[in-house]
Amino acid sequence: MAGMALCEPRHLYNVLNQRRRFPRLAEPRYLCLLDARTQREYNESHIITARRIEQSPTGEYLVPDSEELGCVRYCVVYDCKTSSLDCCDYEEEEKGKDAEEGAAVQYAGSLQQFTRHPVLVLKGGYKRFSACYPFLRTQKILWMPQELDNFQPYPVEILPAKLYMGNFKQACDQQIQKDLKIKAQVNISEQPATLFAEGSKYLHISVPDSLEANLFSSFATICHFIESLGLCSEMQNEHETTPGLCETALRLGDPNLRDHDHRHL
């Protein structure tokens, strides 16, 4: 069996926002995102591209096509607010308040025999994810291939609600700036660009858009700028608990994430 693992909201956010030439959500075997909440809750809103788990007439959860699960890279299940893989942690009165509590773990257990990778259970469920990323909620149920091709990913998140890495197009998008509450930018490109309104903090690092470009010589300047924003201690803590900041952004995503036209923090 592939097993199960908890998935932090940030990890699912980064999985949803990976791209190569097109958004990876357009790849049929990239992500299987399953909603284990009630039909009413799902209809009110759910995470983009999520499918509600189907049930038999007797109320039993049905397993999707086993061949599809065997090929999919990420299989993620969520319910309302499950935060542990041990369903027995929930008290009876809490279960009475929400009959679907713990459903994600129970359903993930039935899926793990079909997947090649561990089935991921979203920690904190829909409640926590939607609180962190309300702009990734939707009532849309059916996504056409062209819509997924045209989906506009957000920058990957390195530090929760603090530090992001994206490309030039994302940096210029005012809706992204608003959704992520961006208040400062590091623009790493050959040409400066006016990306922010007056009063915002901005640093331009002139570096050719090339894989051979030397970024290390600019690290001191970038770190000083980040230090002025009060993020250095958080970056240090993140570095001590993970292999590195780039790995933090990519460990559940695609190694070819980075666009080579511009890099922005």
Image (cartoon, helix red, strand yellow):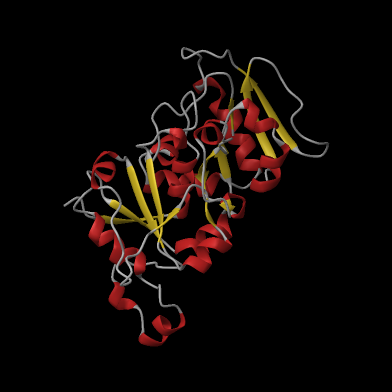
Q: Nearer the viewer, residue 176 or 227?
A: 176
Q: Nearer the viewer, residue 184 or 140?
A: 140
Residue 159 on image: x %, y %:
52, 46
Which residue is at 32% across, 40% downward?
A: 73
Which residue shows up at 52% across the image and 49% down it?
A: 48
Quarter of the image where one finds residue 87: bottom left
The reply, left or right, for residue 224 in relation to residue 73 is right
Residue 183 showing in the rendered view: no
Quadrant occupied by the C terminus: top right
Q: In the image as oriented, which residue stretches furthest toward the right?
A: 198
Residue 99 appears in the picture as rendered: yes
The residue depicted at 46 percent of the width and 54 percent of the height is 9
Q: Along the line of sight, which residue is nearer the eye, 165 or 99? A: 99
**Could you say where residue 177 lies in the image, as x and y percent from the top left?**
69, 41
Total numbered labels: 0
In the rendering, at what x and y percent does residue 152 appear?
59, 35
Furthest residue toward left: 1
Q: Is residue 79 left or right of residue 132?
A: left
Residue located 74% across and 30% down the image: 195
Residue 225 falls in image quadrant? top right
Please identify the residue farthest to the front as the structure is shown: 57
Quarter location, residue 253: top left
Q: Is residue 104 left or right of residue 245?
A: left
Figure check: 79 above or below 68: below
Q: Is residue 53 above or below residue 169?
A: below
- Residue 33 rendering spot, x and y as whole percentages: 41, 50
